[in-house]
Amino acid sequence: MKLLEKLKTNQEKKKALAKHYISKEQIKKTAKENSRIIKELEKQNNRKNVPEEEYLTEMKNPNNVVEFDDLHAYFFTDAGVVKAVDGVSFDIPKKSIVGVVGESGCGKSVTSLALMKLLQSPTGQIFSGEIRYNAKNGKAYNISKVPKIDMNKIRGKEMSMIFQEPMTSLNPVFRIGDQLDEILFLHFPEITQEEAKQKSISMLNTVGIAMPESVYSRYPHELSGGMRQRVMIAMALSCDPNLIIADEPTTALDVTIQAQILDLLRNIKNDINGSIMLITHDLGVIAEMADYVVVMYAGRIIEKGTAREIYKNPIHPYTIGLQKSIPALNLNDETLYTIPGTVPNPINLPNFCYFRDRCEKRFGKCNGEYPKLLQVSPTHHVACYLAEEIAAEFAKTKKDGGEKNAKK
Ligand SMILES: Nc1ncnc2c1ncn2[C@@H]1O[C@H](COP(=O)(O)OP(=O)(O)OP(=O)(O)O)[C@@H](O)[C@H]1O
Ligand code: SF4
Ligand SMILES: [Mg+2]
């Protein structure tokens, strides 16, 4: 009897383990299928001499600088397809700061890398959807269709990126000045050595670096973390971009320097008269800086709206949880709130609300299919069954208002 029981338990254990392993055959099959898709997508990306008309488009709203429209960005790995960004749509209006917030791994960086067309290829690919970009020359480009070679016209001159960790983004063996000058030579081939040096020094001055001439000839390791981040911002600014993407620009810095860098970014936005896509997992930073906020969870947008709406009137239980987990000095609670559980595996995501297993407010309906993104005000959208009532009320008020106006 005991032996039988032992055998049964061993079999159950094997079954449980098998769930976490992928067979060789399965890996082979997935790799074959992936390679077929990747080949097709890479063929499109690597095209040369493509007439511009093929990737020109029209903005839905000319007041936007970027429009993400049902963007799907995937990684085709042997373990399966990682749907890092799975149907994301939002706009970055001109002269605004749009904050993208969410837990680690929710697809914030992948969204921005897709916009710059810097996804780690060949595995990382924009699978479908449009990213419309309103360029300085008045043309609108569909970034998803722009071949890699032509992206060089847009990157740097039109949009540039500030990364999380400046030490890994700066080349340790070149002086700061050489790295700044190089960008200028790349984008303005006619510029002289002396002109490049003067412009680089003036950029260092703009980002608040004391003794810019001296910093110009130093190596990255001779600067503090805050100074290095300022250099990164100077680099991002040197070609007068229309849009700056700042991916966790202050995470590696201490609180006082963080505040200075955020101030600098705010001033710079006004100076360049452009927009900023600010990526962070800190809702506090967003509240201080952003005009609009996009909250992501497991590759999808679960709530978006103006910063005021997201901060004062969050609806999705995840956004509410994020807000509760911001440390506050004036609270007496000894333990800080944490959202229980973890994000689901990005391969094989379930067919119901991805937040369901962590949600304290789940109810019967939440076992149904993934909730649609509902409009609860002209600018506020939420993907949660709890938002349905609010959305219905909003629709009713709109209808009543419309009828009253018609009667007048
Ligand atoms: N090169 C890659 N290969 C496979 N999967 C990847 C790759 N890069 C990112 N991913 C996956 O894509 C998903 C989204 O990653 P992303 O880097 O956008 O997260 P994030 O929101 O920026 O997180 P963080 O706050 O930690 O920076 C994650 O599940 C991640 O594991
Ligand atoms: S749909 Fe249901 S489970 Fe998902 S966040 Fe809303 S209440 Fe929670
Ligand atoms: Mg990231």
Image (spheres, helix red, strand yellow):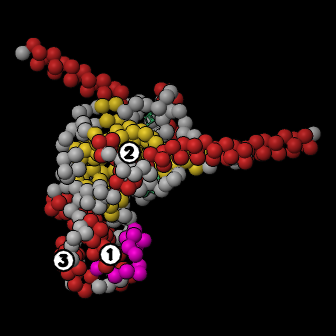
Mark closest to the chain's N terminus, 1 or 3: 1
Q: Residue at x 43, y 31 (%)?
A: 371
Mark 1 element type: helix
State the residue lying farthest toward the left: 408
Residue 219 horizontal/vertical position (percent): 35, 83
Mark 2 element type: helix
Q: Nearer the viewer, residue 42 or 158?
A: 42
| C-alpha gap between disc 1 and disc 2 | 29 Å
Left or right: 190 in relation to 346: left
Cβ at disc 3 under 8 Å from ligand 3 = no
State the residue lying farthest toward the top: 407
Report the residue marked by disc 1: 179
> Would you identify the image quadrant in which residue 258 lies?
bottom left
Q: Residue at x 17, y 60 (%)?
A: 272
Q: Are marks 3 and 2 in contact (CB under 8 Å)?
A: no
Report the residue marked by disc 3: 195
Mark closest to the chain's N terminus, 3 or 2: 2
Answer whether residue 33 is magenta in the image: no
Residue 299: in sight, yes or no? no
Left or right: 140 in relation to 16: left
Mark 3 element type: helix
Residue 199: in sight, yes or no? yes
Q: Nearer the viewer, residue 181 or 309?
A: 181
Q: Amino acid at mark 3?
A: Glu
Mark closest to the chain's N terminus, 1 or 2: 2
Q: Amino acid at mark 1?
A: Gln
Q: Is residue 298 above or below residue 244?
A: above
Residue 352 horizontal/vertical position (percent): 51, 33
Stretch of the chain drawn in magenta: 165-177
Q: Residue at x 36, y 47 (%)?
A: 50
Few, some or many residues within 10 Å of mark 2 (<14, 14–19, 20+): many
Report the residue marked by disc 2: 144
